[in-house]
Image: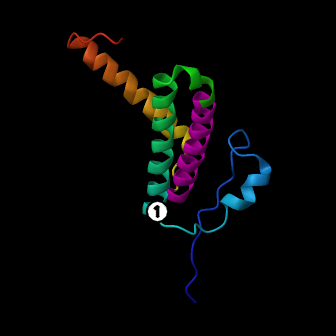
Amino acid sequence: MNEKKTNQKVWDKDLFPPSIESILTKEPKISIFGRLCIITYELGDLYRDLFYAYRLPNEKRAHLANAKLDLGELFVQLSILCKELGFDEKELRELGWQHLKDKFEELSKRGWVPL
């Protein structure tokens, strides 16, 4: 018998409401590369709404509201990708913050001053 192993993890209740857990524990219906396409699409929506928010001052509030939704959708897609890859989301955030700190320290030594 050829059994497929699934990466069942206990979900962080702060990140995912319980009603969503059952959706996210099912086998993915798209490939990792399909997920990356969705992430790219969501990032494009965010870019568009932020661009419009700052280029169309009369519509800024509406576009910023859309950007907030875009960010939420992007976070969810990234969280799903983490699960699909078997990565710990909290560990990745800590790693990312540490890497950014290290980068800033290195650039500071070279004379770069952040804006």
Q: Residue furthest left?
A: 110
Q: Quadrant of residue 3?
A: bottom right
How far from the left and from the top, in percent, is residue 51? Answer: 45, 30
Residue located 57% across and 37% down the image: 71
Residue closest to the eye, 54 or 96: 54
Q: Which residue is mark 1?
A: 34
- Magenta stretch holds residue 6: no
Residue in view at x 44 percent, y 56 percent: 37
Q: Residue 96, percent across and down?
A: 44, 33
Three-letter code, disc 1? Gly
Front residue of this view, candidates 21 and 39: 39
In terms of image quadrants, where is residue 28?
bottom right
**Residue under the point 69% across and 50% down:** 11
Label 1's element?
helix
- 70 magenta-colored: yes
Q: Quadrant of the C terminus?
A: top left
Identify the image's colour scheme: rainbow, by chain, secondary structure or one colour: rainbow
Question: Is residue 44 rendered to the left or right of residue 110?
Answer: right
Frontmost residue, 35 versus 63: 63
The residue drawn where x is 58% and y is 90% is: 1
Q: Which residues are magenta?
A: 63-85
Main SS category, magenta section: helix
**Residue 110 in the image, given as x and y percentages of width and height:** 20, 14
